[in-house]
Amino acid sequence: MSKHLSKYNDVIIIGGGIIGNATAYYLAKKGLSVTVLEASKDIGIGGSSRNGGGVRQSGRDTRELPLAMWGIKNLWPGLSEELGVDVEYTQKGNLRLGKTAAHQKILQGLTDKAVSCGLDVRMINGDEIRAINPYLSDEVTCASWCPTDGHANPLTATLGYYKKARELGVRFITESPCFELRKIKGVIRQVVTPDAIYEADKVLVAAGFDSRKILATVGIDVPMMPLKMECLVTEAEPPMFLQMLGTADADFYGHQSKHGSFVFGGSSGFEHLNKDNGSPISSSIGASCTCRGIIKYFPALADAKIVRAWAGWLDDCADHVPVISPVEEVPGLYITCAFSGHGFGIAPAVGYNVAEMIADGHSTIDLSALRYDRFKPKQ
Amino acid sequence: MKSINDRSQDIGPFVSQTDDAIIICRCEEITKGEIRQAIHDGMFTVNEIRRYLRAGMGLCQGQTCGKLVKNLIARELNVIPDQLDPATSRSPMRPMEMKVLGNEEVSHV
Ligand SMILES: Cc1cc2nc3c(=O)[nH]c(=O)nc-3n(C[C@H](O)[C@H](O)[C@H](O)COP(=O)(O)OP(=O)(O)OC[C@H]3O[C@@H](n4cnc5c(N)ncnc54)[C@H](O)[C@@H]3O)c2cc1C
């Protein structure tokens, strides 16, 4: 089939996840013409529709913490109104739970780092924990508590950005996998898909771990690997608690959603050895293992019924921190990927700041610690 | 075959219909009108409708309304239903208590 040369755009975004959709929205708001190319049939089919909904600052690396804090202060509170879709943002704090001295040490380390960046997070004891969440087992003896953390609905947030960007004239084309980027006269110019070649002045690669293959076509590499993670959801339960939860050991994390079901994610320890060939299918051990983890902390949930389990991919970076960066070797090319399992909570802030980076050449939050060329060999 | 991939294609304005108030997803009480409006908001696949509205996300996990939603999308976009994928089915096939799903002990009767 001969390829037609598609209409010219200011910006082409590769990947219709929450990062691509949010950036498209903020670019369109600035008046730029944008096309988003999504490989699959569904907008938001990747990590963006599979995550645990945490909107956290606590527990983050200090390099991405400023972005997380800025987004929680400036974007999340007004997001439902801005998008015209209920993103169910709930800012009732995050408890990261522990039971042992080793847990206490992990939590204290994370807390000290966050405090040094100006975040209100502190260690609390068992009684203080159960005053916040009375359903927790007596075995829980320590926690880090960040009152300004929270959670939101990743499905409506991802599709809300899509809906609003589309209303502002952003063109979204599904089943359009980009397999090659092309430079013309040294600058980025063309995005090649099986059906068409798209042209733009600027191109953003926001395709999760698939970004690696795409970037390789212009000689750029981001050191990351796909890592499977699993989640489950219960039937609707009466309202119990509003906090986002996690544990020092990462046995599970999650929250109760607005309509009542609990959404929990967890790991079995075999994620890096997963056998399927590229499709995020939940394993036979994953959900069972997560259930055991949850019951140990929340005995009251033992009778809650699981209605669904699923899996998704993390784009796990060498240093577990995202790459958000312009690419100097390929003028006009930008990268947002390698979110390493915590890209949802910062997605609005990433979209906003990357739109500024692309349109204005600088962003509100300094993103230089997240550059693509920060990785150095060990000697 | 008409493609639904270009999400900016003109599907005409949303025109309300007399039976828009009927419930399509009984578990989550989502009406025909809400589903049709979501299609005009850009949700062109069964998965997108599900994630946007919770249609098919309740106790029966879409076993009752999945086909109806698909037909509504097909009609609104003027394509044949076979062109649309059904929503993804996932384990467990019946709702199951955490203490049962998480039980590793083998009992010898
Ligand atoms: C199980 C799980 C739990 C998580 N929990 C949390 C949490 O609690 N809090 C948090 O902050 N984060 C969490 N995350 C991480 C978060 O979901 C992601 O970091 C975030 O969604 C990343 O968004 P994205 O748009 O970069 O990626 P994705 O949503 O993966 O989007 C990338 C898109 O690019 C498309 N694509 C791929 N290749 C191509 C191509 N060649 N051409 C065109 N398009 C292409 C894909 O189809 C996909 O739609 C979790 C992730 C998982 C998997």
Image: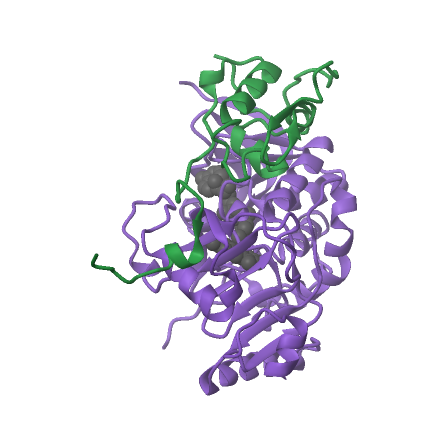
Task: Judge from the rendering whether residue B67 lies leftward or rightward of residue A241; answer left or right.
Answer: left
Residue A75: in sight, yes or no? Answer: no
Query: Residue visible at 60% across and 56% down?
Result: A256
Chain A takes which shade in the image? purple
Task: Judge from the rendering whether residue A50 lies leftward or rightward of residue A79; answer left or right.
Answer: left
Q: Position of residue A373 (x, y in %)?
A: 49, 63
Chain B takes which shade in the image? green
In the rendered image, the vertical position of residue B25 relative to residue A188, given as above or below: above
Query: Residue visible at 49% across and 36% down?
Result: B60
Task: Judge from the rendering whether residue A5 lies leftward or rightward of residue A354; answer left or right.
Answer: left
Query: Residue visible at 60% across and 80% down?
Result: A111
Q: Position of residue A342 (x, y in %)?
A: 54, 60
To which quarter of the image does residue A198 belong? top right
Task: Judge from the rendering whether residue A124 lies leftward or rightward of residue A32; answer left or right.
Answer: left
In the rendered image, the vertical position of residue A201 relative to residue A292, given as above or below: above
Q: Nearer the viewer, residue A123 or B93?
A: B93
